[in-house]
Image: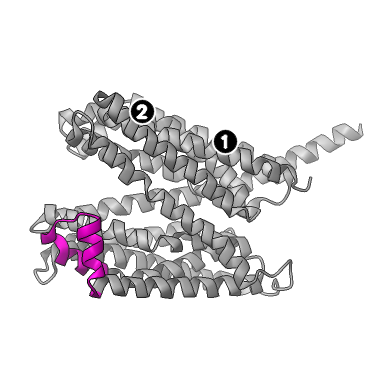
Amino acid sequence: MKAKAYEPRTLTAERGRTRSIIGFHYPLGLTSILMASTFAVVSFGLAQTPDPALALAAFAIAQSVTNFFVSPLFSVRNLLIAVGTNEDSMANAIRVVFWVAIGLFVWLLVVSFTRVGHIIFIDLFGAPIELFGDILAVVRLCLSLPVIYSFRAWAQAILILKRQTPYLILAMGMRLLVMLPLAIVLPGFEMLSSPAVGAIIWIVGLSVEAVICCLCAVWSRADIGGRGVLGKVDSLGDCARFLAPLALHGFLGSLTFPAINAGLARTLNPEISLAAFQLAWSLAFFFVAFVQPNISQTVLVFLENRQWWESLRRVAIKITVVTSVALLLFVFTGLARIVLVSLMNVSDDLVGPAILVLLISVPITFFAGVGDLWAGAALHERKTLMLVFAKIADVVGVVLTAFVLSWIIPSWDAAIAPAALLIGVALNYLVLRRLVNPVVKNLMP
């Protein structure tokens, strides 16, 4: 009789945990989907400029390289969430973020106003010399990024810790509402260079999102006080040691797509391969972004003991399976073809390869989701170096697969890209599971 009395309470607790996890995750996933759509808004604005090809090329080069430089700030939200249950630790983490942001701002200044910029963009990345002036104009507008990314990360960490993720949707929605009219109006201003139009749309949108997040975070911090005495205080050194592997993880991740593009350039039809992959991945990314990195953020916030881990694992696998099936249905129902042909106006020679890329992206979505589950456990237990080892396996797998397949079977064309990504995310998942599993087993019952 006692066992029977215990089962309903256990089932009720499990349902409560499941509801909490799903209610927290879905706003995060929807926010990522909205964020993915902001890139389309910027591209739309650039396409309306007098010289869209130049604008798209210069902006793409400047944005990708600048984001590479400031990528350490993409990881600070995880740091702030990990230490955020202790006010003293949070204060030390903010100090670390401040000095990182200052260092990156100084570096962008050097790139913008010295010959270092020429060395990086022309000599190293091979940008056309005629685009150099426009690239520098975008980079100079990006000097505000360290400040924007830092404040946004702090505010988002507070909202995530408070489990008020719907505010993130509000902020992202306001970002889109501001960017859309800018994309329509700014191309008509002759005083602005074409690439600068994209930079202004992008940065103003980011700024609006950061301000809305900060306002919501300040309002929600009203009842956060008094937690500074809980737990061990993380020193400045502790925070730096947590962040450093994450920064390296971000740098390693930035090598993936250049390696894939280099492999595609060696196929039988490089132009079609590159274009088909870019088009297809822009659609597949909506599905991947729903699970990664949002599952790890959910684990980071909710993981308390082994019971919570089991609940998180079950929900994360279900969410990942549903998302993967949704992508599969997107392909097999013909909706993907409709989007490519009717909405994106893709030529017939690109539709077939793009559909194949989307199909291979289904298992990529699955492995990205389950891998992110274990990444969240590593973050929670402060084992950030494990993420680096897994990412090394990921990048090595992508690079070797892309180059070997393009050498042995160049006729695979665009399919080589998702095949390389699939090998990478699968290795990332396997390494993380192997490294993190002993840590999870030591969680309190």
Instruction: Tell me what residue is drawn at x 8 percent, y 58 percent.
Output: 50
Q: Nearer the viewer, residue 299 or 419?
A: 419
Residue 312 visible within the image: no
Q: Return the x and y of residue 172 as percentages of the image width and height.
A: 39, 59
Quadrant of the drawing holding the N terminus: top right
Q: Amino acid at mark 2?
A: Leu
Q: Which residue is mark 1?
A: 317
Relative to 220, say whether 346 is above or below. above
Query: SS at mark 2?
Result: helix
Q: Which residue is mark 2?
A: 359
The picture quadrant where one finds residue 415 is top left
Q: Return the x and y of residue 290 as percentages of the image width and height.
A: 45, 44
Q: Is residue 121 magenta?
A: yes
Crowding at label 2, few (<14), some or many (≥20) Cα neighbours within 10 Å? many
For the stretch drawn in magenta, the main secondary structure is: helix
Q: Return the x and y of residue 432 as percentages of the image width and height.
A: 58, 41
Query: SS at mark 1?
Result: helix
- Which region shows up in magenta? 113-139
Q: Amino acid at mark 1?
A: Ile
Q: Which mark is residue 399?
A: none
